[in-house]
Image (cartoon, helix red, strand yellow):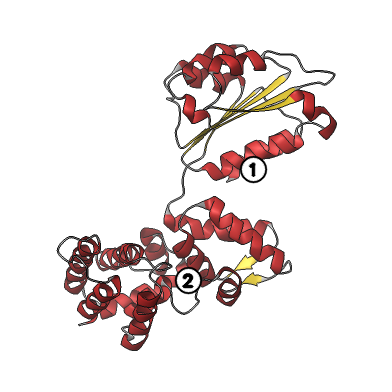
């Protein structure tokens, strides 16, 4: 996030490079930087003659180079944005000769999503010397809630830890998808608002009471009534609550509890750091660890693996997902 901001800030300050090679597993920042350059690098009246968007599936590296070598028409520069450049992965190294001596009046933006070029190859070294190489790394699930908080803070909003976790568990780690939902919330709520679970439930459709976050919390404190209410809700809403996601999240949760049991230093700071969780949730893990000794947690992980296999049709063909979940939580809580 910080590196992407630095690139955009440099462009705002007039420090424009001839090549921007944007690559990596997370497309969100690649799109953000490319879109900023497309929208702001030249005046609107110059774009029709001096700004071009090309696509990797339709263009060759030779065609990209040919266009990049053109001179701008009645303007200081031209901008060429190559989208879906990963479709040129077999021939992308041919760009090396141009990168060695790029046209100074051209800004070439290469969007190389989901892949990256080899740092040992000549192309990487040539681009790094004459332009900017940006690698957009996919965030781990435990990093996304912090990303949500920082993104909202930069726009004048806050969010409660539970609300952030709800978004992560419902939307996954796709930053573009999460950002779309955050934009909706910011259109509705005035600046200075703290995004709450209630606001998310009303405007995004994620239940604040019946979700995987609440299921884990209820299991942790052994609230049998609440656990079964949530499981019954999941059984009636399987499309929005797929069993494979629930089992995966529970597996991660009980693996963290097992990890907690093995810690010599159980201070709040160390638990948060080791388990990679928000310090706000440490007390929940302490309670869960008291309720589930290490030997029991080991058994639960076995139950979760068995349920995962059954949910995929192995050894339990035709059993409804809701029944598998009910059987699972009974085993966990007994």
Label 1, secondary structure: give it: helix
Looking at the image, residue 213 sits to the left or right of residue 258; the answer is right
**Image vertical order of residue 1 relative to residue 159, above or below:** above
Please tell me which residue is depicted at 52% across the width and 59% down the height of the picture: 146
Q: Residue furthest bottom?
A: 225
Which quadrant of the structure image shows residue 148?
Answer: bottom right
Label 2, secondary structure: give it: helix
Q: Position of residue 254 (x, y in %)?
A: 28, 68
Q: Earlier in the sequence, mark 1 or mark 2?
A: 1
Looking at the image, residue 48 sits to the left or right of residue 183; the answer is right
Please tell me which residue is depicted at 49% across the width and 52% down the height of the picture: 174
Q: Are marks 1 and 2 in contact (CB under 8 Å)?
A: no
Which quadrant of the structure image shows residue 260?
Answer: bottom left
**Image vertical order of residue 284 relative to residue 39, above or below:** below
Q: Position of residue 75 (x, y in %)?
A: 83, 21
Q: Is residue 152 visible?
A: no
Along the line of sight, the residue nearer the viewer: 273 or 38: 38
Checking the image for residue 266, the label placed there is none
Query: What residue is disc 2 on?
Result: 280
Q: Is residue 238 visible?
A: yes
Characterize the local packing of mark 2: few (<14), some (14-19) or many (20 or more) Cα atoms within 10 angstroms. Answer: few
Instruction: Quote the CA–CA distance across marks 1 and 2.
Output: 28 Å
Could you tell me which quadrant the C terminus lies in? bottom left
Please tell me which residue is depicted at 76% across the width and 24% down the height of the picture: 50
User: Which is in the foreground here, disc 1 or disc 2?
Assistant: 1
**Image vertical order of residue 59 relative to residue 208, above or below:** above
């Amino acid at each position: 996030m910080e590196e992407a901001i630095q690139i955009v800030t440099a462009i705002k300050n007039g420090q424009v490079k001839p090549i921007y090679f944007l690559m990596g597993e997370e497309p969100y920042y690649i799109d953000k930087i490319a879109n900023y350059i497309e929208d702001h690098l030249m005046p609107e009246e110059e774009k029709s003659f001096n700004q071009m968007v090309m696509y990797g599936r339709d263009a060759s590296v030779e065609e990209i180079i040919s266009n990049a070598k053109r001179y701008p028409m009645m303007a200081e520069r031209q901008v060429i944005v190559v989208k879906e450049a990963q479709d040129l992965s077999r021939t992308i190294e041919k760009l090396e000769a141009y990168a060695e001596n790029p046209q100074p009046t051209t800004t070439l933006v290469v969007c190389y999503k989901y892949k990256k070029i080899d740092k040992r190859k000549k192309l990487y070294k040539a681009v790094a010397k004459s332009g900017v190489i940006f690698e957009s790394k996919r965030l781990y699930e435990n990093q996304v809630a912090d990303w949500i908080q920082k993104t909202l803070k930069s726009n004048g909003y806050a969010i409660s830890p539970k609300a952030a976790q709800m978004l992560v568990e419902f939307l996954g780690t796709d930053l573009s998808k999460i950002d779309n939902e955050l934009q909706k919330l910011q259109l509705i709520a005035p600046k200075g608002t703290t995004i709450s679970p209630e606001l998310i439930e009303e405007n995004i459709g994620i239940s604040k009471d019946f979700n995987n976050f609440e299921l884990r919390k209820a299991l942790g404190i052994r609230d049998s009534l609440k656990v079964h209410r949530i499981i019954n809700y999941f059984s009636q809403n399987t499309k929005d609550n797929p069993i494979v996601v629930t089992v995966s999240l529970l597996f991660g949760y009980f693996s963290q509890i097992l990890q907690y049991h093995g810690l010599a230093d159980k201070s709040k700071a160390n638990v948060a750091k080791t388990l990679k969780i928000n310090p706000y949730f440490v007390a929940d893990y302490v309670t869960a660890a008291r309720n589930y000794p290490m030997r029991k947690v080991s058994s639960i992980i076995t139950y979760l693996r068995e349920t995962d296999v059954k949910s995929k049709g192995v050894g339990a063909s035709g059993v409804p997902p809701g029944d598998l979940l009910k059987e699972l939580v009974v085993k966990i809580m007994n």
